[in-house]
Image (cartoon, rainbow, N blue to C red):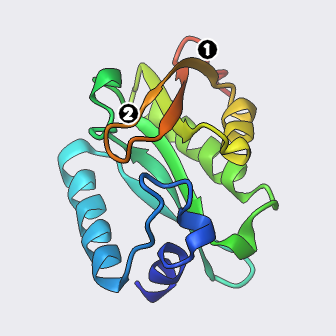
Amino acid sequence: MAPMAAVNADPEVMRWIRDGRVRDEQQTRAGIQAWEREWESQGFGLFAVEIRSTGELAGFTGLSVPAYLPEVLPAVEIGWRLGRSHWGQGLATEAAAAVVRFGFEERGLERIVSIAQVGNDASERVMAKLGMRPVRETVNTDGGRRVRVFELSSDQYEYA
């Protein structure tokens, strides 16, 4: 839990998450518990992203229901959050590609969305590498920031 709390406490990491506020250890613990409940109720959730050679936690990627943006529902969102020391190494793309495969091939999803705040160019590059395309721009009701919604359908997904 402490490694994820460190990621959540970094203002540079959190500036693109909802309202941009950092999270403390208690908030991180509550978030992890909510993610675990989502696995039980939805059959999908977030995966820890670890560095293979060291076992160090880099962050997470996974699937969740974006209840904070009701206008896109029903939907399943792919998201990721990595510690700053792991940025720019292709980890988000590699991990997210595995989650897209899981969503379509293992969970039979028909579409996956991803939502990024306008200006979060790094996340938008990951979305493009996943084959996702922008479908709308709107305002996130949980923070009031402009966001761009990307989408990939199972028909567009290339099964390997």
Which dot marks residue 156?
Answer: 1
Would residue 26 be visible to someone looking at this image?
yes
The residue closer to the viewer here, 68 or 142, is 142
> Residue placed at 37% from the left, 81% from the top?
24
Of the 4 image quadrants, the one containing the N terminus is bottom left
The residue closer to the viewer here, 152 or 15, is 15
Would residue 49 be visible to someone looking at this image?
no
Question: x, y percentage for residue 59?
Answer: 56, 68
- Secondary structure at numbered mark 1: loop
Disc 2 residue type (three-letter): Val
Q: CA distance from mark 2 to mark 1?
A: 16 Å
Residue 86 sits in quarter: bottom right
> Residue placed at 24% from the left, 43% from the top?
42
Question: x, y percentage for residue 48?
Answer: 50, 66
Position of 2 relative to 11 (above/below):
below
| Front tag of 2 and 1 | 2
Is 121 situated left or right of 73 in this image? right
Disc 1 residue type (three-letter): Gln
Residue behind mark 2: 76
> Residue placed at 24% from the left, 62% from the top?
34
Which dot marks residue 89?
Answer: none
Is 132 situated left or right of 43 in this image? right
